[in-house]
Amino acid sequence: MIFGPTQLAEARGSILAHTVRLGPNHGNKVLKKGTVLDEAAIASLQAAGLREVVAATLEAGDVPEDEAADRLSRVLAGPLLARSRAATGRVNLVAESAGLLLVRAPVINRLNALDEGLTVATLPAFVPVTAKEMVATIKVIPFAVPGHVLNVAEALVKQGPPALELHPFRPLKVGLVLTELPGIKESVMDGAVEATAARVDALCGTLLPVERCRHETGPVSDALVRLKRQGAQMLLIAGASAVVDRRDVGPAGIIRAGGVIEHFGMPVDPGNLICLGRIDEIPALVLPGCARSPKLNGIDWVMQRLFAGLKVGSQEVMGMGVGGLLKEIEVRPLPREKAPSAGTPSIAPRRARKIAALVMAAGRSRRMAPLNKLLALDDTGLAMVTRVVENVLASRARPIVVVTGYERERVEQILSGRPVQFAHAEDYAEGLSASLKAGLAALPPDVEGVVVCLGDMPLVTGAMIDRLLANFDPEEGRAIVMPTFRGKQGNPMLWSREFLPEMMNITGDVGARHLAGKHADRVAEVEMADDAVLRDFDTTDALKQAPGYGGVR
């Protein structure tokens, strides 16, 4: 192809490279880019006083852009992929049904590396698509490509398996077993039913009536057998307690029902704790805790492939690691909402949760009498409760409610001017539970959780509190978050709103920590780098050993 300034006398059959506007004296006629110059077009240009234009002139063997794009689209488009009409060197490939798109990246990469004039862009591999959704676009960059280049491109695509395949979703019947444990509210597990039903519906399937049973191997096995008799083509188990081993209740139920376990775990987060098995040829999966959430997680990737009729075994699962980090992880330096968009387009930034903080500052400080430890000054002259509040203010927790009781006026005065709210516990003398309930009652109704901070733990930083907030995710089973240091559990603790009614029923001089044992399956521990989360200060001697409190007074 010859490109450049071309004399109009020699331009017949050439392709105009840039749009030319002839002006009002020539009827405002416009010759658009890509126009093939015929006698009439050349005459109009000459009448406007032009003697040359920038044009492309095809040589022997060159293939025009539309023809080249059309030919390449023919070899790339397989079953269920429709082609658009070629225009301006472009052809789009569109899905004719809902399904899972397979893209063989090496073929596409070799094709794009063949010649700069031929390009193919596709959606990511293994992405679900809807009917009429564009899955790829072929664009010929210049006005023509050499015929031998196009021949090589066609041969390359034809050599092996299709570069693009659409596997339609099959209308499978899905059975769900929901296990239950004493003390676990039915509403907690209802989220698993709703999320599963939505996933099945989106994949063109049907969810059979849910089987509820005790979280025991025998009942799980019996429920699986009943669902199989009802015609289930896929079996799912959502456990009241997350599966942690191949021999756990869910996998054991699959084996007892005559099945086998093929793989446990996957390099996708959320979704690590998935267990894959089968009963005869029916896939049987034990769902991870994150399956209770509608957010994209590893179970989506597995179910999409199964609905599309693709094999999902150990090799396939362990190949999901690249791109398998699907959510915000608190140790990652750049939050997803601040990072450039990349990867699967259906992954949306996480919505910031509204987490409140309670600062417990109502105690009488008996062991440090006559000194009120909350008002003890550090080496810079800052009261302990002030230091605690400033640490909490440095976190993302909002609003911050300070619970007062003993020496209420002094505590409020020393915190004056800081953006906190106060809740006074009239019956603070009855113990910690009374102060806790006063603080909880002052929380706004739209908070999703609350982190309970003790007023005598001045070494806990805002960054430590933010680590707890980053790990909080009730839908994925992390509804109670507690810090640890070398395996020892500490404070503060973060609680989902779902536990507030139980917390309001606590009596005596105790906090809510015992509820974590009752709801162990909903607890997430976060290991900290130092022991600040273990250190409260109840005596003058202990406080003098704390950093910054050598001259306590």
Image (spheres, rainbow, N blue to C red):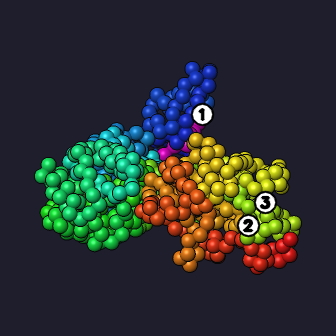
Q: Secondary structure at mark 2?
A: helix
Q: In the figure, 254 relative to 434: above or below?
A: below
Of mark 1 and mark 2, the one earlier in the sequence is 1
Q: Residue at x 50, y 52 (%)?
A: 502
Mark pair 2, 3: CA separation = 20 Å
Whether residue 416 is visible: yes
- Give the residue at mark 2: 366
> Above or below — where is 354 with respect to 510?
above
Q: Is residue 87 left or right of residue 95?
A: right
Q: Which residue is mark 1?
A: 50
Does 229 sit left or right of 155 as displayed?
Answer: left
Q: Which residue is mark 3?
A: 386
Q: Secondary structure at mark 3?
A: helix
Quadrant placement of the C terminus: bottom right
Q: CA distance from mark 1 to mark 2?
A: 99 Å
Q: Nearer the viewer, residue 166 or 306?
A: 306
- Label 1 vs 3, first from the N-terminus: 1
Residue type pointed to by label 3: Thr
Give the spatial CA distance, label 1 vs label 3: 81 Å
Residue lying farthest to the left in this orientation = 229
Q: Please tell me whether the stretch drawn in magenta is mainly helix, strand or loop.
A: strand
Magenta stretch bounds: 50-56
Identity of the residue drawn at 51% across and 28% down: 43
Q: What is the number of the mark on residue 425?
A: none
Identify the amino acid type marked 2. Answer: Arg
Disc 2 crowd rating (10 Å Cα; few below 14, some 14-19, many 20+) is few
Which of the pair 115/219 is nearer the observer? 219
